[in-house]
Every structure is written in structure tokens, then in C-alpha cells.
């Protein structure tokens, strides 16, 4: 719902009851219409003066802020030009002895106070009817609430916002308390160590070297698995047992073949 700031009265020029005993009604209506037009022009000139007054005040405030900013820029430029970069830096003791910076800029506050109400809205507010005197019934209430607040309550939205903020704060506090209790109930899980990657090429190279080195590599692999993943399970133990047997068979076949070729070369040599 829009709030009209300025109303030009009268709104209707000819909606007026004619007095009795008028002989020439058309002339009377014309005179009333002209009078209402003059009243409208008077109201328009009044509001025009009010608008230009507000523009003057805004321009004056803006000019004051611009001049203040220009003075600050001039002081800062003088300080920057006179600053010597070769000068020694301040010690920590001198810095701590200085007072904290405090800005002299006045922040705008209480923007919606009754004193900051524009003149047209203040006139509209004064024209409004007073609320009924329901405060006289407040002493007879058992809940201790004011009777007038059931009819009009200017602080309703503020109270609603305050209640919502308090509820959000309480919910966050409960969530933190619940998370803390959850962390206490559940112990810290141990850090998981990733398994070592399976390198088949390296395994075949070690198998080709012989059973002795293969057994050493199997023992090292077993130790690495125990260190990375804890004690070996039943499946891992069987895997290592089968793996060692395959290493022995492969090494026996390879070594036996090499010995046969060496013996044939010895016999066939001249």
C-alpha cells in the first residue's frame, strides 16, 4: 500500500452540495469550481516550496560533506608529500604507546525517529484520529499486558525480529552442544594408510633372480603389508604362502634350464 506524502486539496472541484435558495445554480457551481481551483493552486505552491526546501537542505548537506572530504584529502596529500622514505621505522614500543585511532565522522542514526519525520507526513499524522483510551483497562488485566497494544502496537515488528534472533542464537547453541557431545561419544578414528601399489613387473624381475631373493622379497612384502594395514589376515597369509611356492617353482625351472644349457655347452665345446 503506497504512502502518499503530499495531498493536494481539494481533490474534487465540483462535488459540493449547493445551498438552498440559489436561483442560478450554474453560476454557483462555476464560482465554487473556481474557488476550489484557487485552493488547489495554493496547496500546490505550498508543496512546491516544501520540495525546494528539502532539495536545498540536501544540497547543503552534500556540499558540507564534499568540503569536509576535500579538507581531509588535502591534509593527507600534505602528509604524503612530506613523508621521508629513508626515515627509520617506528619501534614496537612507540607503536603501542600511541592511542587507538578514533574517527571523528558522525554516523547517521535514528533515521526513522519522530523528529526526522517530514513536514507533510507530520501534518498527515496530526490529522489522524487518536486511538481509543484502552489503557484505562490495563489495571484490570490479569496477564499484565497493555490494553492499547491489542489495538495498535508500534513495536510489534521489532519484538518479532528480536524473538527470531534469540531463537536463531538458541538453535546455534544447541547445535554446537550436540556436536560437542557427539564428538565426545565417538572416539577419534585411526588414520587410514593406503595400500602399496601392486607392481607385477618388479615381482617378475625379483623372481628371475632366484628363490633366496624371492623369499627375502616375500618377507619384505609381508612386513610392508603388516605395517601399512596392521596384522595380516587369513586371506593374506594364504596369498603369501601360494606366492612363495610359485616363486620357488619358477626359480627352479629357470635355474634348472640354465644349468642344462651350460652343461650342453661344456660337452659340445671342442
Image (tube, rainbow, N blue to C red):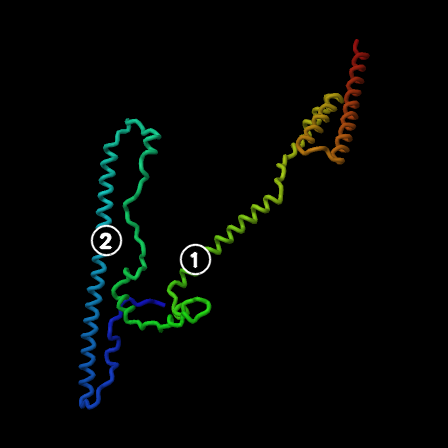
Residue 6 versus residue 239 in the image, above or below: below
Gap in Å between the C-alphas at discs 2 and 1?
Answer: 34 Å
Instruction: Please tell me which residue lies in front, 150 or 221.
Output: 150
Q: Residue furthest top?
A: 270
In this rendering, the label closer to the viewer, 2 or 1 = 1
Instruction: Please tell me which residue lies in front, 40 or 181.
Output: 181
Q: Quadrant of residue 156?
A: bottom left
Residue 144 versus residue 33 in the image, above or below: above
Q: Quadrant of residue 126?
A: bottom left
Residue 15 versus residue 47 in the image, above or below: below
Residue 124 versus residue 234 in the image, above or below: below
Quadrant in the picture for the N terminus: bottom left
Q: Is residue 186 left or right of residue 52?
A: right
Residue at 27% x, 45% y is: 104
Q: Mark 1 highlights which residue?
A: 162
Find residue 61 and name its label.
2
Q: Residues within 10 Å of mark 1 (few under 14, many from 20)?
A: few
Residue at 63% x, 37% y is: 190
Q: Position of residue 48 (x, y in %)?
A: 21, 65
Residue at 31% x, 60% y is: 113
Amino acid at each position: 500500500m503506497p504512502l502518499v506524502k503530499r495531498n493536494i486539496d481539494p481533490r474534487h472541484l465540483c462535488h459540493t452540495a449547493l445551498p438552498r435558495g440559489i436561483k442560478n445554480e450554474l453560476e454557483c457551481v462555476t464560482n465554487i469550481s473556481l474557488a476550489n481551483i484557487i485552493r488547489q493552486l495554493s496547496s500546490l505552491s505550498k508543496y512546491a516550496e516544501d520540495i525546494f526546501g528539502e532539495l536545498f537542505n540536501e544540497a547543503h548537506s552534500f556540499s558540507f560533506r564534499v568540503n569536509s572530504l576535500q579538507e581531509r584529502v588535502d591534509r593527507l596529500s600534505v602528509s604524503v608529500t612530506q613523508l621521508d622514505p629513508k626515515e627509520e621505522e617506528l619501534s614496537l614500543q612507540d607503536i603501542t604507546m600511541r592511542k587507538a585511532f578514533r574517527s571523528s565522522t558522525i554516523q547517521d542514526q535514528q533515521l526513522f525517529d519522530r523528529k526526522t519525520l517530514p513536514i507533510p507526513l507530520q501534518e498527515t499524522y496530526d490529522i489522524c484520529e487518536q486511538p481509543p483510551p484502552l489503557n484505562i483497562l490495563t489495571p484490570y488485566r490479569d496477564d499484565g499486558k497493555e490494553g492499547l497494544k491489542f489495538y495498535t502496537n508500534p513495536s510489534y515488528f521489532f519484538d518479532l525480529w528480536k524473538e527470531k534472533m534469540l531463537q536463531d542464537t538458541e538453535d546455534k547453541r544447541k547445535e554446537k552442544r550436540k556436536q560437542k557431545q557427539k564428538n565426545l561419544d565417538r572416539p577419534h578414528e585411526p588414520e587410514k594408510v593406503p595400500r602399496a601399489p601392486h607392481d607385477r613387473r618388479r615381482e617378475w624381475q625379483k623372481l628371475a633372480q632366484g628363490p633366496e631373493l624371492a623369499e627375502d622379497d616375500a618377507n619384505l612384502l609381508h612386513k610392508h603389508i603388516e605395517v601399512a594395514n596392521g596384522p595380516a589376515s587369513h586371506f593374506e597369509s594364504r596369498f603369501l604362502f601360494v606366492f612363495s611356492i610359485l616363486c620357488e617353482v619358477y626359480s627352479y625351472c629357470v635355474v634348472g634350464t640354465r644349468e642344462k644349457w651350460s652343461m650342453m655347452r661344456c660337452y659340445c665345446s671342442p
